[in-house]
Image: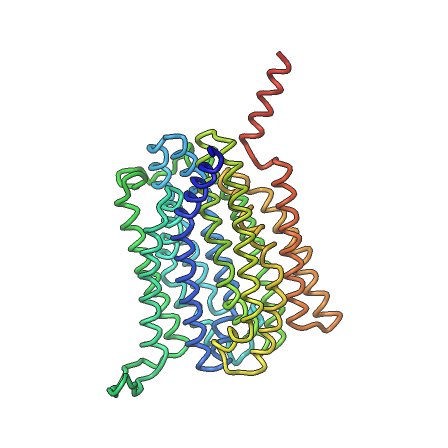
Amino acid sequence: MQNEFSRRAALKTIVLLAWPTVLEQILQTIVQYVDSAMVGRIGPHATAAVGCTATINWLINSSTSALSIGFLAYISKELGARRPDNARRASGQATLAALVVGALFTCLALTLSGRIPLWMNAGEDIAADASRYFFILYAPMLFRAVNIVYGTCLRAAGDTRAPLRVNLMVNLINIVLNYLLIYPSRPVQLFSLTFTMPGAGLGVTGAALASAIAFTFGGIGMAAVLWRHPLISPKGTSLRPDGKILRPCLKVALPCALQRFGTSFGYVAFASMINGLGTTAIAAHSIANTAESAFYIPGYGMQTAAATLSGNCYGAREPQRMKRLCRMMIALEVLLMALSGGTLFLSARMLMGLFTPDAAVIDLGARVLRMVAVTEPVYGLAVILEGIFQGVGDTKSAFCFNLLGMWGVRILGTFISLRFFGGGLTAAWGCMIAHNLLLGALLLTRYLRGNWNPLKREMNQLQEVAHGI
């Protein structure tokens, strides 16, 4: 009876932490869908112009997010150990980190915006639009960095609802401005009423402006929430670098940042090779990635809960609770991703049709979506295990495994298949799937061996000392 109660309590804790993040991911994905559908109605040219720099977006955002993982691990551990003052000081150092990283990426992105589409092998017909889109999108990078880093700090403190509310506001602003800025003024009929809907008719540029304005509001909103938080508000803390806080945070964050930088740079190389396949392949790849993102929601929604809970258990020195929670989260994750993958397989063609009327793009995109759908449970397993490891500060193993899979399997395999065997988008996605399968297998092996768990290592050391005595 006690075990039954413990399982119920554990499941309740997981759900309470995970559901706002899952809902937030759903809302963000809906906005991605709406963005892609709105741009897609302009034509494959516009879709390709927006999509050709998407992997650079991942590179910048994931590197910023990786930095915040160090603060997540530290804050969740300190709160689990009942040391809220240290957690609050860490949020002050997170402010410093967000300012530095935001300013750095702003300068780099704006300086290189004219060259990035060319490096991405974009055709001359889309390079100018792609460059303009990228420049506008990253003008407010400082606000984006604040949104990402502060949102992670709040989730580390167990507050997943406030980031949900802020990002809901961001999404609504983005959708409304998309509608007003992308299309020209046009007659609209609502029931029996007909009126003129004003519009700027800016196309791809309008989509970039809408996102940039929304990101600015998001950074301001997330900052306002964190500064009012009762436990981890950085108000009154020093913005000077504090080695006692930064060293353990950076010890976790740097391998994670290098991993995400390395894998994201791999995505850039991967997309660059695909961009050489022509406009149809670029559009199909971009739309399929957007469509597939909805089916990663259970994985990434649960990952935040996994990192927070494993960090809390580590700080509170509760190995049995950690073991129970990890097993439950893994089982729940695999089940959810199996359902997600089955839905993706059955709805692949319909999803592609939401974003483009082009038959060739729909056929190619549906084919690769069905390929990847059958491996969703393995990918979900990799995502949840990364979250568990991040919470206890083990980011080096994921760094090594991801780089091995990305560069040794995905990039090398894609290069060989396209260059020497004349493969197309399906061959490239086959290499991507092989990478995901290898990553899942390697992370699962490490989890089963238990080397990632610092509490297990501490217990083993105590036993060795006891036997020595």
Q: Is residue 251 visible?
A: no
Please, which colouring scheme is shown?
rainbow
Q: Is residue 115 above or below residue 461?
A: below
Left or right? Give the position of 85 relative to 253. left
Q: Is residue 467 visible?
A: yes
**Residue occupying the far front of the picture:** 1
Task: Identify which residue, 438 or 244, lies in the foreground.
Answer: 438
**Residue occupying the far right of the picture:** 420
Task: Identify which residue, 248 or 186, lies in the foreground.
Answer: 186
Q: Which residue: 30% across, 60% down?
A: 217
Q: Quadrant of the C terminus?
A: top right
Left or right? Give the position of 68 relative to 340. left
Q: Which residue: 51% across, 73% down?
A: 351
Percent coordinates x, y for residue 189 in the rendering: 29, 86
Percent coordinates x, y for residue 306 in the rendering: 48, 44
Give the mark count. Answer: 0
Q: Is residue 443 above or below residue 116?
A: above
**Residue occupying the far top of the picture:** 469
Percent coordinates x, y for residue 364 in the rendering: 61, 76
Q: Which residue: 60% across, 17% down?
A: 465
Q: Quadrant of residue 418?
A: bottom right
Percent coordinates x, y for residue 389 in the rendering: 54, 41
Q: Is residue 467 above or below residue 74?
A: above
